Image: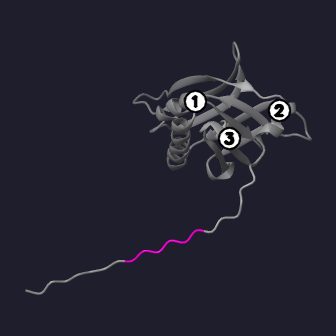
């Protein structure tokens, strides 16, 4: 399995950072599903016991300038990772004025999502700050546990009435 992506646009980086920061406030761990054209953040805590369930789908083309993935096989070109979203949020916060951010799946002492932040410098050399976020690779046999939830059709109506009172004296 291989994964690497690169962000250059600061607005895209800030948007991704806000999404991950929001997710980090909802749960201590989440599933990051990577496909050729999308990223999914999945929370599936026990809803019956008051947990949170969430399905967040992001088109990689809206965020990344480069995006390459080689999944477990050609038939299943996907990668499922369990990670602590707070760690990813912290690493993206250091990149708020970065020239570029590279994210890749690496094998250090354990599987990691490595975030390399290229920061501007006054000299001709760039400074690179690297964050290694430990991840657990979810085996193929467990992928069905993280399928998109069935959401019932909903009907929402909102009625807003505004009254203005003008007093003439």
Q: Residue at x 54, y 35 (%)?
A: 24
Where in the figure is residue 162, as x and y percent of width and height? Answer: 35, 77
Q: Is the magenta stretch mostly helix, strand or loop?
A: loop
Instruction: Tell me: residue 87, above or below residue 63.
Output: above
Say what secondary structure mark 2 lies in. helix
Residue 78 seen in the current view: no
Q: How crowded is mark 1: few (under 14 residues within 10 Å), some or many (20 or more)?
A: few
Q: Nearer the viewer, residue 20 or 3?
A: 20
Please name the residue that numbered disc 3 is placed on: 42
Left or right of 112? Residue 147 is right
Where in the figure is residue 140, as x and y percent of width and height? Answer: 86, 32
Please name the residue that numbered disc 2 is placed on: 142
Q: Which residue is drawn at 67% across and 51% down?
A: 61
Disc with the residue nearer the chain's start (2 vs 3):
3
Q: Quadrant of the N terminus?
A: top right
Disc with the residue nearer the chain's start (1 vs 3):
1
Please name the residue that numbered disc 1 is placed on: 28
Disc 2 from disc 3: Cα separation: 14 Å
Asked whether 67 falls inside the magenta stretch, the response is: no
Magenta residues, start to end: 156-161
Where in the figure is residue 123, as x and y percent of width and height? Answer: 42, 28
Q: Do the residues labelled 2 and 3 touch (CB within 8 Å)?
A: no
Where in the figure is residue 17, as x and y percent of width and height? Answer: 52, 41
Q: Which residue is drawn at 69% across and 44% down?
A: 40
Q: In which quarter of the image is the C terminus?
A: bottom left
Say what secondary structure mark 3 lies in. strand
Q: Which residue is drawn at 73% across and 39% down?
A: 33
Q: How crowded is mark 2: few (under 14 residues within 10 Å), some or many (20 or more)?
A: few
């Amino acid at each position: 399995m291989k994964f690497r992506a690169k962000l250059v646009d600061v607005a895209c980086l800030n948007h991704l950072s806000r999404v991950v920061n929001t997710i980090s406030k909802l749960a201590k761990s989440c599933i990051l599903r990577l496909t050729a054209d999308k990223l999914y953040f999945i929370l599936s805590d026990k809803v019956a016991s008051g947990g949170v369930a969430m399905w967040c789908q992001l088109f990689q083309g809206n965020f990344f300038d480069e995006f390459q993935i080689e999944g477990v096989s050609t038939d299943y070109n996907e990668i499922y990772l369990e990670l602590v979203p707070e760690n990813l949020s912290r690493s993206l916060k250091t990149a708020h004025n970065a020239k570029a951010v590279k994210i890749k799946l690496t094998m250090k002492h354990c599987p990691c999502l490595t975030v390399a932040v290229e920061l501007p410098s006054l000299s001709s050399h760039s400074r690179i700050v690297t964050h290694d976020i430990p991840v657990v690779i979810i085996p193929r046999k467990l992928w069905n546990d993280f399928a998109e939830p069935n959401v019932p059709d909903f009907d929402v109506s909102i009625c807003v009435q505004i009254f203005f009172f003008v007093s003439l004296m």
